[in-house]
Amino acid sequence: MDGSAAPLLRTRTRSTCCYCGVGCGVLIDAERDAAGSRIVGVEGDPAHPANHGRLCTKGRTLAQTAHSTQGRLLAPELRAHRQQSRRRVDWAVALDTVADRLADIVHQHGPDAVAFYLSGQLLTEDYYVFNKLAKGLLGTNNIDTNSRLCMSSAVAAYKLAFGADGPPTCYEDLELAKTVLFAGSNMAYAHPVLLRRLEDARRDDPQVRWIVIDPRRTDTAAMADLHLAIQPGTDVALFNGMLHHLLWEDLIDPAFIAGHTSGFGELKSLLREYTPRMAAELCGIEVADLIQAAEWFGRSPATLSLYCMGLNQSVHGTDKNLALIHLHLATGQIGRPGTGPFSLTGQPNAMGGREVGGMATMLAAHRDIEVAEDRAQVERLWGLPAHTLSAKPGLPAVALFDALRSGKVKAVWIACTNPVHSMPDIGHVREALQRAELVIVQEAFGNTDTVPYADVLLPAATWGEKEGTVTNSERRISRVRAAVAAPGEAKPDWWIANEVARRLEARLAPPGAAPLFAFDSTAAIFDEHRRLTVGRDLDIGGLDYARLETDGPQQWPFPANAVQGQARRYTDGVFATADGRARFHPTPYRPVAEAISAHYPLRLLTGRLRDQWHGMSRTGRVPGLFAHSPRPGLRMHPQDAARRGLAEGELVRVTGKRGELVLALQLSDELASGTVFAAMHWSGQFLSSGGINELTQPAVDARSQQPELKHAAVRVEKAEFGWHLLAARRGEVLSLQAAVQPLLKECAFAELSFAAEPGAGDDIAWLTLRAAHAQAPPDAWLDAVTQALTLSPGADSVEYRDARRGLLKRVIWRAEAGERHIDGVLLSDTQPHRIEEALLERALSGRAWRGSGLAVFAQSGHGLRDALVCNCMQVGETAIREQVAQGAGVRELQQRLGCGTVCGSCLPQLAQLCRQPQRA
Ligand SMILES: Nc1nc2c(c(=O)[nH]1)N[C@H]1C(S)=C(S)[C@@H](COP(=O)(O)OP(=O)(O)OC[C@H]3O[C@@H](n4cnc5c(=O)[nH]c(N)nc54)[C@H](O)[C@@H]3O)O[C@H]1N2
Ligand SMILES: Nc1nc2c(c(=O)[nH]1)N[C@H]1C(S)=C(S)[C@@H](COP(=O)(O)OP(=O)(O)OC[C@H]3O[C@@H](n4cnc5c(=O)[nH]c(N)nc54)[C@H](O)[C@@H]3O)O[C@H]1N2
Ligand code: SF4
Ligand SMILES: [Mo]
């Protein structure tokens, strides 16, 4: 404190968004002084070809996710026995222990007793080192990733149809397509910046037609010219029926079929039975709509299909992909600008993982484990003795956790994924981790549902702190750069894997063997990866970090001497199969794995929310991102609810064959009767249960091994409880959450959420806790919650109790500028309807309370808060509806209220509100 404050250094770092597969370029602003470095802002990179400066709500709030180190893992932790709790250790101890214990297990049980479970959010360089460690050093192919839950059906179908993985298309095709078919993709939420590009294109050319295939009327479907609300899982019947019509009406391209494909004859005889009428019946749609879709597809000068988890996450995911690809091949809608089947990747580096072969069924650079020549090539390139690589495919995700549960696999190393939340049937995943001999978890954040199972916890550096590359949906490789130092002792993933590998090498490799892990930087790793791709379909022989530095992000293939990457593949009609022809495969329609029954009469759909990312370890740190969809819940059609005597907001028990959970009911006419929907995001960080994957389906597609996460059969009943609690606290929500999270599990139902307070800034917000139980929980539990949320009575509180009726109402005040504000609320009652949500609304509004103390319990707060539509400009639904009632369209809304003028993520919803001016 000598008055001469350390000079503040401002830096701007070019990097890539860490969320979705769009792969938007970002500019990270950071400040550095004597105390360290901080990320202070994030903007879209105008020079990045994926987004040209745009970002969605998630990208725009990236800096807020990095504000505090609360909840970050800062040092390695270890425990010798399951009964112990973990203690902090030095990196040297942690790395030696991991190497010792893995080496022991390999000596005792062989290499296949060890497994790795990784993530499409690792960078290519992280992935590369892990893959080499498992396959090249340990000699096991038991290395799978969350991409198995995500992309593996798309991979299987691309390989079967074209002979190689990867989309033939590029983002420019979004602007050039005249018919756009969205299949099982809610781009308005999941790939918002690409939807902005499509919207612009349709505005410029009103002839552009959008067809959306989704059992739900999503925001994307609401914008479509034609929405086919098919019965869940019936896509193959639909595509077969469309192709039948195209065949019948001579809208196919016989020259393309004859010149560039094989297998059409066999498919044709199968298609005979898929008349449009029969197909439409299977799908539960109008035959005229099916024909309309086929006509737009076949007659368009350029048809582009965009597809995602509604196709992949199915026991027939590979068939769904193939049946769609067939439509493109049969009509020659491929290899030209604006055409082709475009699988949208979900995670930022799902593609990179595929490139380095980081899955149980692949080898580096799109090589195959089962092909001897492919193994021999990798052995030569890695300098391994012949026949060191195992020919036995490793265990894909679901089988991997089954093998841990049965004891066949003893150790698992989990990095950058949270399987106790995201795998299907998480009850079984928990059992698997409990039974495992050794669980290593490499994470950035400490409160995920997988962390409690770790015997070794390795703190990872995360976005903004680490270096490497990612490949986006259009095969474009972008640099990821560090803007600040990692907090505490957190280290980059590649470094951790590399350090363990070196130690394992010393223990396992024959003396005199050339070192496999001499990497000293991510650039060195990328360079080795580059060399492995030469001569392959994804050849990036011409790319290195220097090139990416000078020329910016590049698409593969990019062979040596190329001046730029290749935007489109198969433009010459020559495919990557042995004979150069694309292949048709018979795709009979088959129903979903779990039939509905009298016992489980409803079909559960799962998917994403606009402003949350997966298990919310990052987006769940930003209170503002909760506004668009504030609470976990189960969505149901109002008629289905009425039939069960259920009302909006009531607690319901959702039961499936594998488990149950309690959620609040949300009525929604976006669903067809007979289906219900739950977002995948909520986990044990926010619920007493582990989230919707308590119920989901572990059955897998035979070819891709991808589980059917979208289609379990369930039953929904009223959940009756004799005791209810509503608590809310204003403050630093991350600390409040850390304190209260361990208590959630002890209630039959508990639910946390955050809410930003208008004008309160980034660091102060509201945490709300709702809980219910058969009867009032032991005093100790309520005391613990009261303490965790600092809701104890005191001089600054007012309280009303009626012990006979089991009623407690407490408000904690805060004085600010001479006025009284609500700072905390605690309400418990035996009757749910007596819990005053209105009081909560009043508190969250942040407005001063001018009445007398006790009167606060009598005030209704209705209308103080409403659903936030535009996050950037903080515009709520009420204001928008008022304008719409006066005849405003989207443009007028933008002009008058400013909504939809910044990131544009709310534009689909604005358009929808304009179309339904009178809906309540
Ligand atoms: N906001 C946000 N964006 C994300 C992510 C996120 O967590 N949050 N995650 C990223 C990742 S990893 C992925 S994989 C993508 C996923 O992106 P999407 O696949 O677009 O998203 P989902 O909501 O999982 O599923 C898409 C739609 O499939 C529909 N569906 C369900 N069953 C069927 C069916 O049988 N047939 C058809 N045709 N449709 C069906 C659902 O109703 C849902 O609307 O999103 C990426 N982007
Ligand atoms: N019911 C249902 N379940 C689903 C889906 C669905 O649609 N429905 N979708 C599936 C799909 S498509 C996907 S992709 C998966 C996603 O599921 P997960 O992979 O479990 O999702 P995330 O929450 O993104 O997990 C990434 C973890 O890595 C941590 N992390 C962040 N940065 C780093 C880093 O740099 N290094 C390390 N080591 N860790 C880091 C994060 O804190 C987070 O806990 O979920 C699947 N599960
Ligand atoms: S669309 Fe949004 S989440 Fe996806 S990369 Fe761009 S900014 Fe990130
Ligand atoms: Mo995904």
Image (tube, rainbow, N blue to C red):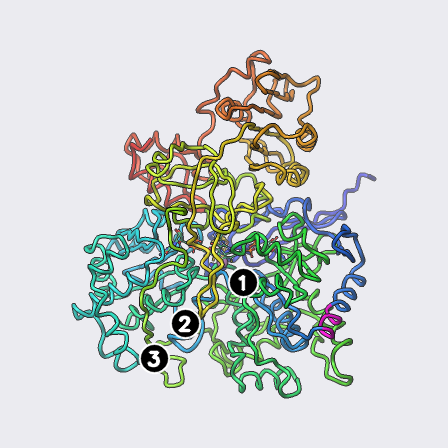
Q: Are marks 2 and 1 in contact (CB under 8 Å)?
A: no
Task: Give the amino acid type for the residue marked by disc 1 in the picture.
Answer: Val
Residue at figure coordinates x 29%, y 51% from the top left: 227
Task: Give the amino acid type for the residue marked by disc 2 in the picture.
Answer: Tyr
- Residue denoted by label 1: 398
Residue at figure coordinates x 62%, y 40% from the top left: 745
Q: Can residue 303 be seen in this view?
A: yes
Q: Pinpoint residue 465: horizontal percent, then vertical percent.
A: 65, 56
Q: Are marks 2 and 3 in contact (CB under 8 Å)?
A: no
Residue at figure coordinates x 77%, y 85% from the top left: 512
- Left or right: 543 with respect to 506? left
Q: Kindly state the secondary structure of the residue where label 2 is placed.
A: helix
Between the residue at mark 2 and the residue at mark 1, the CA separation in whole angstroms equals 22 Å
- Residue denoted by label 2: 158
Residues in magenta?
A: 102-108
Q: In this rendering, which labeled residue sits more in front, label 2 or label 1?
A: 1
Main secondary structure of the magenta stretch: helix
Q: Residue furthest left?
A: 249
- Residue denoted by label 3: 572
Between the residue at mark 1 and the residue at mark 3, the CA separation in whole angstroms equals 39 Å
Q: Kindly state the secondary structure of the residue where label 3 is placed.
A: loop
